[in-house]
Every structure is written in C-alpha cells, then in structure tokens.
Image (cartoon, coloured by chain):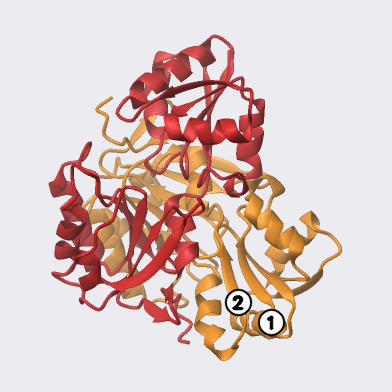
Chain colours: A orange, B red
Amino acid sequence: MGELFIVGIGSGKSNSLTGEARAALAAAQLICGYTVYVEQAAEMFPGKAVYATPMMRELERCHYALAEAQKGKSIAMVCSGDAGVYGMAAPVLELLPQYPGVTVRVVAGVTAALSGAALLGAPLGHDFCVISLSDLLTPWETIEKRLRCAAEGDFAIALYNPSSKRRSAHLRKACDVLLETRRGETVCGIVRNAGRDGESARLLTLAELRDTEVDMLTTVFIGSSQTKDIGGRMVTPRGYGL
Amino acid sequence: MGELFIVGIGSGKSNSLTGEARAALAAAQLICGYTVYVEQAAEMFPGKAVYATPMMRELERCHYALAEAQKGKSIAMVCSGDAGVYGMAAPVLELLPQYPGVTVRVVAGVTAALSGAALLGAPLGHDFCVISLSDLLTPWETIEKRLRCAAEGDFAIALYNPSSKRRSAHLRKACDVLLETRRGETVCGIVRNAGRDGESARLLTLAELRDTEVDMLTTVFIGSSQTKDIGGRMVTPRGYGL
C-alpha cells in the first residue's frame, strides 16, 4: 500500500519549504493539487507526474490521490502555506476510511498568517485568531460571530480569503463588525503575495482598512488593543512592558 | 551597519527549517537565543560564535544582539517554532528604535500549533485561536476572557505553555472555563515534543483533558463543535459536508 503525504509548500518558492516538505516531494511518484500549487511544485521538482484540478474540484483531487495511493504509489498532495490550515489535510482524512490500507502523513508548512506577519513585523506576537472570510463553505453568520468574539477577546486577527470577485464587500462588512468594539485607530496591516514575486506589505488603521480594496492574494492583519506601529512595523507586544 | 535576522527554527531539527531560515543561519556571524535553541542551531551550523541566555533573560539577549548588529555584524536570533508567535520578533522590534541603523528581518517558521496539528491530523482545518496559558506576562483574567471568547466563537484552539511547575493547575482551570460552553465529549489532542526525538500525540476528550497532567513541552488542541475523531485522527472539517 502506498503513502499519501499532504504537504504544505509555504509561499510556493523553494526557500519557503521545510526540509521535510522537500523530502516528501522528492520521494513522490505523483504530485496532486490545485493547478497553481502543482505548477509551483513541478518547477521545484521537474519531471514528476502531476494531477491538477481547478478550484471547487478539491474532492475529486482527494479521491484521485487516495485511489492512486491505494494502488501502492507514493503521492504528494500539495497545499499553499500549511497542509492543515484551510488545506487539504482535513478532507483527505475525512475520506481516508473509504481507502483502507492507505497511510496519510501531514507535513506542516509556513501558513500565510506567519509569512505575512514576518513581513509586517510581529503582529501575532501574542494570542491571535485566524478567520477565513470565505462563505463558500461557512455561513456568513458564523463568520460574523467569530469576528465579534475575536474582537471581544482582544485577539490579534489574521483574515484569510478577505475578498473575491463574488464577495468584494466581505472585508468592509468584517471591519464594520470589528469597529463595534475596536477603535478606528487600531493598527492593521495587509500583505500581498508574501514570499512570492511582487510581495508587498503595508500598515494602515482599521478605519482605513474598511475602505480598502484587497484581492484573494492578500492576507489581512488586525491588531489587538496593544498592537503598535513602531517605525512602520506592526508589533503586538508579548508584555515585557517596553 | 549589520543585519539582525529573527529566525524561527521550527522543532529545532534540521528538516523542520525552511530554506530561508537555513540561509539566514548559514550567513550569520553570531547566533543568539535561549540556551536550548542556540544548542540546536549550533548542532546544525557548527563552528559559529554563539551567545545564549537562559529563560527570563530575554531582553538582555535582545539588547546584546541589537548592539552586535550595530557594530556591523550579521546576527541570527533563533526562536523555537516561528519567530513571531510568542517569539523574539516583537521585543526586538520594540527595542529597535534604540539602535539606529540596524536592519531587522523576521524569518517565519513552523510554529508548534502547525507541527503539532500535523501529527494529530487536521485539528486547525477551520478558524482557530492560539492562546498561551502562561501568566508570567499576561494577567490570568485576560487569558480566561480569551478562552471564554474562543469557546463562544466555537473556534478550534491551540494552547501554548499549558503548564509549568509554577502553574500546574492552569490547564485544569482553562478546561473548566471551556466546559462552561463546550461539551465534555469535545475532541481534544495533546502533542509532546513535535518534530523532536520522542514525539508523541494522542486524542482525548475535553473532560479527560481536564484531569490530565501535561508539561511545558506539550501543545494542547481543543476541537470546535465540528471536530471529529476519525480513526484516531483529530479533524476539524472545512465544511465540504463529508
């Protein structure tokens, strides 16, 4: 029986992979995943067999990878960032009981909350939440409730999928929920294409963020009440009282 | 003027480093950090000058690293896991204005929430919170409030610093707060020494977790209401309805 590795490939650039992720990709006979991530992996490990499906076809990809592993192959399913954070590890493990004998191993990676935070400074230096604004698979009411709880708990927050063509108003709606309890001057940051060509990062206030357009390649960071702008770096202190 | 890289070294084993972290350590003239992490880095990059301070002496270490960078050296400050998540990036950036001319770059790494999650399955497959139970620098009331908000928002939760000699009752207290709203059958997991020799991971219920002793080398995962035990793997579904 084969093994299926669910591999977080970070930004998709070679230097953001861990050694463990490199080893899993090097050993794989077949690389599966979303088209863009498969192309990134294939560039790092040329000559491998690949199987790619577009967005919204995630489950097809999972079934294919599990079936190929059941035939005895060593498979790598690639995910952007980490394998588990809004990644393929969960659906693959949910389907695994249908494929007896297959071994699944999850290989962690640097998720966008961490790579984006590094570019901004240290916005996640204390307790934080990670929330996706995509309502494709989650009711908006659930998202809104989580935003409200995160604000009430004074967490720093990383927002994934802050916008898309279909939901361009989501970030504004999210900011409005946060502004019920957080000050408009709250230090925020946006990072686009972290670790990729053309990466950019900038700080702004929550009030400004509300009226800012972002795209799917962006990760948004909302500071806690303690977060500071220190010379253009977004820093959530750990509490040393500096 | 020199550069100071704040580098997340993951578990401390070579295969958990990203390529970017490897490059920063290879280029450094001096490696600074907490004694244990400096030893791990020195094992991977032998022959480097090192400067280590024990726990509770973090600021001394930051000042030393910044002063050495100001002299023109290339310095790597190593952190376990990620550089920003309860790491040294925040205090270094807070002190940076005292050291004009020094450039600080933060190099992200795989934090224990991600490496531990990979061992358990996919506990952080949907929105999650990261909370430290250490009250050394944070009032317990703040921690308790965040636990309550995280529970109310039905987040999956990763708990850092769940226990220590000085605060052996913290995990029990935290579980009691969560049990105000979460069911005792909530799927939880504990991971010890993720990515290191002697790593271990196991699932248990929130009611069982309350009466379990853990140590400082452990990361604790609390499921959301949706989290499942699938053949011994802890999985928080993304919402595909599988």
Q: Which residue is mark 1?
A: A1
Is the Cβ of the residue at disc 1 closer than 8 Å to that at disc 2? yes
Q: Chain of mark 1?
A: A
Q: Is A108 left, or right, of A224 in this rendering?
A: right
Q: Is A151 left, or right, of B172 in this rendering?
A: right
In the image, what residue type sits under mark 2? Answer: Thr
In the image, what residue type sits under mark 1? Answer: Met
Q: Are marks 1 and 2 on the same chain?
A: yes
Residue B216 against residue B107 in the figure, above or below: below
Measured from the top left, where is residue B62 in percent x and y?
41, 22
Q: Residue furthest bottom?
A: A98
- The residue located at (58%, 16%) in the rendering is B2
The mark that comes first in sequence, 1 or 2, is 1
Task: Using a 10 Å C-alpha cutoff, classify the residue at mark 2 as few (fewer than 14 neighbours), some (14 to 19) or many (20 or more).
Answer: some
Q: Chain of mark 2?
A: A
Secondary structure state at the residue bearing disc 1:
loop
- How many marks do you count on the picture? 2
* Closer to us: A135 or A31: A31
Q: Which mark is residue A104?
A: none
**Visible residue check, residue A180:** no
Quarter of the rendering occupied by the N terminus of chain B: top right
- The residue located at (40%, 17%) in the rendering is B63
Q: Which residue is mark 2?
A: A103
Measured from the top left, where is residue A22 in percent x and y?
69, 55
Task: Tell me which corner region of the image, top left, top right, bottom left or bottom right, holds residue A96.
Answer: bottom right
Secondary structure state at the residue bearing disc 2:
strand
